[in-house]
Every structure is written in C-alpha cells, then in structure tokens.
Image: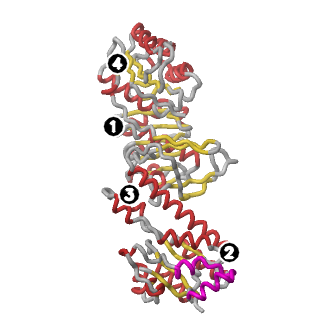
C-alpha cells in the first residue's frame, strides 16, 4: 500500500521537485490543502484535498482545515500500540508517514511598515503548529519536515535506508520542528507584548535564535561558541556582507558590535572608530573620512595594531590606502567603493564587512547570571545639550560645547569607570574599566601626554570628590563634562571655578559594565 504524506506549506520553495521525487521514487500519495494542493495539481501531481479526505469542508475562511481526527489521528497513532491501530481501522483513518508543514509568515508580516494589529493576527498559524507538534511528538513512527532545506536530506536518508527514514533523522527533524514552533510562538508573544502600552516589566521574557554558524571557539580556545540570529529575517550582523577576509571569530563579533554602537553616535560628519577589546583606543571626526581615520588611528597607534575599525561612510580609495598600512582585524562600513575594494584586496586576510544599516541595534541588552539572566533596555538615550547645566563661572563657547559633546558621546561606550580626554574632535586618552575614577583620570591624562593643554575631559559618572578636577586642571584641561548627582557636586564645581575650568552637568550617567 502506498504511504501517505501530508503537505501544507506557506513557503513553497522546492516543493514540486520534492513531491515528484516522493511520488516517483518512494510511492507516496499526497493529501494537501489550499494553495499547496493547487501548486501540486498545476505541476501535474495527483493530490487529495484535505476537505475531500476528511469529509469536512474548510470553514471560517480557511481558518479550520486540518484540525480533524482523520488528520491528527493519522499523525499521532502509535503503530506498535494495538488500541491505536484498532482506532485507525474502526474510523477508516490512514496512518500518515510524512508531514511537511511550515507556518504563515508572521515575522515577515510584522516587519512591513504600517502593518495593523488585525493584519498581524491573521498571520498567526493554528493548524500548522498543531500538526508540527503532533508529528514531532510521534517521531518514533513518522517524519516531520518544516524547512525546504530538509527536503534533499530526507530523500538521501530514504535512499540510504531502503525507503525508510532512520530513527536518527526522524528525531533530529522532530527537534527542528519543536524549535520552529518555539521561535514562532516567541515572535508572536514579543509582538503582542510590545502592542500593550506600558508593558515595560513583562513577567516573561524569552529569546530564541537560529544558528548562523559554529565558531572556532569563544573568547579562548578551550571555550566552544556559536553565532545565532534572532528572527527569521537576517538583520544586524547576520545581514552584513563580508567582502573578504578570514572567518569571523567570537571576539571579532563582540568587538564589531561595540564599534558599531560607538559609530552610530556620529551621523552627519565623517567619523572613525578604532577599537580593541570593546574599548575605543581612538575616535575622531574629520572633514573627510580619511582624515577622520588618520586622526583616530594616530590617537593611539600602538593600541590600534590588530584593532577593529568602524566608519560611518563608504570606504573610498584614500581611506582604503590608509587601512592597508597596518595590521587590522576587521573593518566595517556602510559601503565600499569599487576602487577601494581593489586596494583593500591586497590585505586578503583583513575582514571587511559592509553593514548599510549601522543603526540597527538591539533594543535590549541581556547578561546571563547563575540561575537566570538580566535584561535591560539599551542605553540609547540621545545626548541633548539643551538639557545640560553649565554650573561654573566660566561658560564654554559653542565650539567648546561641541568638543564636550564629542567626548561625552565616546565616554558613553567606554567600560566603567570611564574617562575620555579629547581635543579637536579626537580622543587623546581613554581611561577604561578602572576600580576608581581617579585611576581612570590618571590613565587617560598619561596617555594623552603633553597634548592635554586646552583639552576636554568627560566622565561617565559623577565625581565624589574634587581630586579628579584638580588633577585634570593641572594637566591643562579647560572643560569637563559629567553627569553630576553627587552629594559633593559643589566641591567639584568650587574647584573648577577656582582653577578656571568650565563644567557641564548632563543629568544622565552612562555606566557600562
């Protein structure tokens, strides 16, 4: 007797060729519904419509098609259970050997601009997940496929096992089915959660991902690692184009994301970021992209060796030439001109990525802790100089405010305790990740050396004492920007007035752990 396959797919890629192989090589018969049945029939394949097989018409505009005992009985029946076998016989139900199902394109729908809630709701599949879960549960007796990429694998497995799918393949396919429904449900729950006004403290937060690739190792060679994308449509780094270079490593991706976050602070003026171990070693603005990169690189050329570079404009020939003058791990930019590609090709191992939408960042940050994880909203608040307080007798000029804004934007992305010293829209020194703020100030000033005269200093947190202000003034710093909020703010303000510095309080801190 011919075996029975149920085919009901939203994504019809490869369906006809797969069905023809099933029919011609392995004597399968098909039941199908709606558009899937039409595609198969138009291709000259014999198919029985679900409504004809069940004896029940599709109702509610197609909302109810496969939710029927003749369908789910054929899927869930255990072939080694006498009662199940008797129930099939008594109800004239054929066992189903293969279920091929993928789901309504919910995520693709909600990704479109202007989609309404009712439109999104209509793309929530009911019958598909029910069949997927039922089939995956009963993998001991049938196979479920939810991805066109599985079609050829299934056919090869049948050929290698005399027409019977192996238990190993069936169990792996079942796992993929459960992962598919889990991801689908997560997308729906996240969407609906976002539709509820004020739902900022959800009692449930889930995250799922599809593996982009296995990585050689994690932060260190003894740590396993893999790269996953969220959602069915690639976005962010999963949507980036790699023009050349070696495979990306775990550390590359972590550093690239840190560099991307910094470069998004600068949109109107050519900007460059050189980064190592998630901290910037050089950030600069310029009249041209090559000028910005040269300034950023020269800010700390020693640390820049083997670094990550992020640019906010397409790579041109002049910038490409500069990029090839030293060893770099990765470069990311929104584009790359053709003549620049030829120049960069000389550094064949350099990883060059094109990410047109540098702004496409995550809305949350997640950290795993023992027994769970922490979630917070991304620190994407925009700096607004109109909300700042100038608290000293000396008032910064408009040009000085622009310098302080630059330093403040960079400092936001430096590991706490964080201090950034800058001048001429270029970082001179960065004090990152120190256990006390005084230490971070000293490191940043020492790195800047004699260039600090007339420079500016940004701090990601307030000054609890006036010692940092005095240290900065002794090095020639002329203006300071910090959040304020210390019980002893007046001590720092008094010291700034005494020493002739300007000081701005932003009202927002930017701790980064």
User: What quarter of the picture does the C terminus occupy?
Assistant: top right
- Per the image, is 90 magenta? yes
The mark found on residue 269 in the picture is 1
Find numbered disc 1 in the image and state the secondary structure of the residue it sits on: loop
The mark found on residue 390 in the picture is 4
Instruction: Name the residue located 44 percent from the left edge and 15 percent from the top edge.
Output: 489
Quadrant of the rendered image containing residue 498: top left
Determine crowd level at label 3: few under 14, some 14-19, many 20+ residues with C-alpha closer than 10 A.
few
Find numbered disc 4 in the image and state the secondary structure of the residue it sits on: strand
Tag 4 or tag 1, which sits nearer the N-term?
1
Tag 1 or tag 3, which sits nearer the N-term?
3
Tag 3 or tag 4, which sits nearer the N-term?
3
Q: Position of residue 471 (x, y in %)?
A: 50, 14
Tag 2 or tag 1, which sits nearer the N-term?
2
Q: CA distance from mark 3 to mark 2?
A: 37 Å
Instruction: Name the residue located 57 percent from the left edge and 65 percent from the top edge.
Output: 178
**Measured along the vertical axis of the image, is residue 80 above or below residue 324?**
below
The mark found on residue 167 in the picture is 2
């Amino acid at each position: 007797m011919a075996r029975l396959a149920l085919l009901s797919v939203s994504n019809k890629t490869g369906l006809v060729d797969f069905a023809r192989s099933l029919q011609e090589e392995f004597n399968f018969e098909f039941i199908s519904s709606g558009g899937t049945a039409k595609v198969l029939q138009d291709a000259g394949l014999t198919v029985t419509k679900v409504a004809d097989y069940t004896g029940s018409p599709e109702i509610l505009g197609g909302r109810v098609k496969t939710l029927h005992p003749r369908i789910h009985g054929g899927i869930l029946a255990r072939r080694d259970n006498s009662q199940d076998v008797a129930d099939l016989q008594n109800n004239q139900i054929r066992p189903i050997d293969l279920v091929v199902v993928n789901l309504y394109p919910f995520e693709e729908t909600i990704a479109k601009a202007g989609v309404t809630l009712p439109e999104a709701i209509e793309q929530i599949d009911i019958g598909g997940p029910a069949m997927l879960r039922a089939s995956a549960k009963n993998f001991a007796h049938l196979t479920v496929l939810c991805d066109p990429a599985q079609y050829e694998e299934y056919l090869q497995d049948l050929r290698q096992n005399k027409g019977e799918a192996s238990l190993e393949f069936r169990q792996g396919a079942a796992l993929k089915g459960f992962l598919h429904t889990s991801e689908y449900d997560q997308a729906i729950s996240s969407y609906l959660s976002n539709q509820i006004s004020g739902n900022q403290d959800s009692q449930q937060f889930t995250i799922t991902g599809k593996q982009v690739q296995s990585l050689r190792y994690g932060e260190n060679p003894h740590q396993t690692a893999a790269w996953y994308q969220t959602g069915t449509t690639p976005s962010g780094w999963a949507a980036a184009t790699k023009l050349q270079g070696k495979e990306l490593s775990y550390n590359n991706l972590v550093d690239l994301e840190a560099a991307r976050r910094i470069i998004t602070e600068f949109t109107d003026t050519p900007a460059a970021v050189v980064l190592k171990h998630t901290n910037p070693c050089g950030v600069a603005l310029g009249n041209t992209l090559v000028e910005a990169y040269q300034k950023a690189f020269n800010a700390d050329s020693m640390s820049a060796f083997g670094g990550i570079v992020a640019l906010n404009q397409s790579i041109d020939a002049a910038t490409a030439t500069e990029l090839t003058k030293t060893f770099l791990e990765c470069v990311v930019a929104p584009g790359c001109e053709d003549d620049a590609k030829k120049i960069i090709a000389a550094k064949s191992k350099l990883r060059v990525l094109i990410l047109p939408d540098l702004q496409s960042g995550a809305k949350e940050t997640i950290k795993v802790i023992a027994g769970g994880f922490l979630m917070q909203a991304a620190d994407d608040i925009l700096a607004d100089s109109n909300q700042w307080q100038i608290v000293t007798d000396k008032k910064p000029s408009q040009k000085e405010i622009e310098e302080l804004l630059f330093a403040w934007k960079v400092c936001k992305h430096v590991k706490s305790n964080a201090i950034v010293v800058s001048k001429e829209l270029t970082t001179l020194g960065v004090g990152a990740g120190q256990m006390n703020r005084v230490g971070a100030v000293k490191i940043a000033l020492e790195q800047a050396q004699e260039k600090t005269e007339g420079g500016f200093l940004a701090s990601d947190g307030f000054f609890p004492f006036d010692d940092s202000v005095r240290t900065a003034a002794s090095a020639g710093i002329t203006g300071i920007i910090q959040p304020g909020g210390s019980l002893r703010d007046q001590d720092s303000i008094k010291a700034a007035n005494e020493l002739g510095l300007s000081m701005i309080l932003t009202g927002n801190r930017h701790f980064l752990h």
